[in-house]
Each structure stands twice: as structure tokens, then as C-alpha cells.
Image (spheres, grey):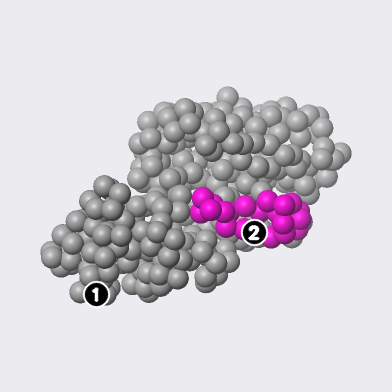
Amino acid sequence: MGDTGPNSCPLFVSSGDLVSDRRYKAAVELAGRGDFAAAADVLAQTVEAAPSFATAWFALGAIRDRLGDRDGAVAAFSAASRADPDDYHGARLQLARLGAGETAPAMSEPYLRRLFDQYAGRYDAALAEHLDYRGPALLRDAVQSALHHMGRPLSFSLLLDLGCGTGLAGAVFRPFAARLVGVDLSAAMIARAESKGDYDRLVVGSLAAFLAEEIAISARYDLVVAADVFVYVSDLAPVLATIARVMAPNGIVAFTVETHSGDGVALLPTLRFAQGERYLRNVIAAAGLNLFTLESAAIRTEKGTPVNGLVLVAGANRIASTQ
């Protein structure tokens, strides 16, 4: 849930040339003083001398975008993408936001890891003080309601917190779990979660790799939660299909998403993904799961405005619909 606005500064990755690096830093200083036109000129000179300098290309794209030069921004972000095949800087996302390239490109692991490693130190404070984040509490209430319809208590032998971050969801669900497992791509986030002492097991790694390993050892979770995680996933179908394979026979999955009024998946200006209701129903059904709960909710606010979201609960068994 990082600082992923369209004009976020890239993390500096050296060009390998001291002069080019100094030019880049001079351009950043100019931009910091509000002289974006001069900063763009310096960056243009920089990438002419160092055409594979991805950080400078990305910064040039961001500044051209700020100046209203869409075509120039697209050209710069395209060059950044070519110079940065792992999309460490997120150039593919910027191109999608500007209407160029893929509509909803997958976020690369290097990009996400960098994003959340940078954000870990101020994550909890930012969510609590500025974003009025309520995702974990909303998930707990939705899970409790679904279990009530099944005649089951809010109690789990084995609970998996996907994309656990600093452990905000883990803190909410810990009282109801005999054993709590968390996984996150960011080592810095995991370190924060570990310091809180709520988890029995924490793993640094991608969701896909972790779930594949859990399938291999026949792990079976009574509850899988993903709080504000799928806003960084462009295609939920394979993720939900894999989650279904690590769920216990009576297991359930609960997650939050941001949503939009259209179909399919849309990349928002914040560089997060929003999923349409029909799309969510389809991918849940394709995973062999039954939808128990689909509720509209403001998971958080941004700049004082509630963000349109959904809280969903699904499982292998059928219960009376709570939709």
C-alpha cells in the first residue's frame, strides 16, 4: 500500500558513470526547487550521454508528465522500460496509466519489493494517521458473519496471512488462530511483523512461490486472508485457484479489493488495480469456490475521500447467501 502516485520518485540506480550520476542528481535538485523545465533539459542531456540509465529516463518521464508533455513522457518511460527489463522502477505501470502499452501489466517482483522495503518504516503510521485504514477489521467482521451462517465459531487451527506486510491483519486475527503464518515479498515488512510477535511463522517470498511450496507439502489452511494485497495483482484467477488448493475442506478465503464500475481489471491513477464485481464473481467461481460475502466498503481514505472497495469471503462449501 505504498507511495505509488504517478509522480513518485524512482529509487536511484547508478548509471555506472560518475558524471551522468552527478547530472541526474543536479536535475533532481532543480525539480525539487520547482524548475521542472530545467530539470527536464538536464535529464535529456544525461540520457543522451548514458542511454541505458533507467533511473534518469524514468525521472525524465515523470517530469515531462508533470509538464503536460504526454508524448515526451511516453517516450521516456518506454526508454526506461527497455533499459530496465525487470521493471524495477515501474515504467510499465506509468505507460499503462498514460494509455500506452498493456492496459493492466503485472507488477514485477523487483518493483513491489523495492516499493514496500522503502515504505516499511512509516507504513503503520501512514495507514493509521492519514488513510483511516480499516481492512483487517472489515475482514474479521465479514469472516465472523460468514461463519455465523455456517454455525461455526471464529476459531482456526491454521491461518494464512497473504501479503502480511507489517502484520496489521495478523494482530486482528491472532486471538482466533492457534497457528498464524504470514508471507510477504518485502523483507523490511516481514522484519516489522516479526518484531510484533504475533506470527508463528513468517516467510519472505512471492505469493506464488510460497503457495506452490505449501501445495507441495499438502498444507491445509482453515482461513486465508489477504488485506489490501490484491490491489497489486493484475490477474486474480491463478492466485485464487492456487489458494483453493491450500485450503482445508471447510476452509475459507477472505480479501479486500478496490473496485470500479466497469468490467475486468483497471489500473488506477494511484498505480493500484481495481477489480469489477462481475470479474470477481467469475474468478471466484473459476477457482471452484462459492461466494459467501460481497460487500461494498470504504477500506481506507485518500486525501479525505473514501476509496471504493469490496470485502469478499468465499469457500468450498455452500452456505446461505449473505450478499
Picture quadrant of residue 311 = top right
- 1 and 2 marks in contact (CB < 8 Å): no
Q: Position of residue 274 (x, y in %)?
A: 62, 52
Left/right of residue 115 with respect to residue 209 in the rendered view: left
Which residue is rendered at x = 13% and y = 64% of the image?
18
Give the vertical position of 200 relative to 213 (above or below): above
How far, Cα to Cα, is label 1 from label 2? Answer: 37 Å
Q: Is residue 248 magenta?
A: no
Q: Percent from the top left, x then y, of residue 11? A: 31, 54
Identify the disc placed on residue 48.
Answer: 1
Q: Is residue 275 magenta?
A: yes
Residue topped by disc 2? 265
Give, as a single range, the part of the protein colored magenta.
Answer: 260-284
In the image, residue 308 sits, relative to residue 51, either above or below, namely above
Of residues 251 and 302, the one nearer the viewer is 302
Q: Nearer the viewer, residue 56 or 313?
A: 56
Decide which of tag 1 and tag 2 comes sooner along the chain.
Answer: 1
Q: Secondary structure at mark 1?
A: helix
| Residue at the image position 58 percent from the left and 24 percent from the top | 175
User: Compared to 173, does 184 lie above or below?
Assistant: below
Pointer 2 local density, CA inside 10 Å: few below 14, some 14–19, many at least 20: many
- The local secondary structure at tag 2 comes to strand
Q: Residue furthest left?
A: 18
Question: Could you tell me which residue is drawn at 57 percent across and 57 percent down?
Answer: 267
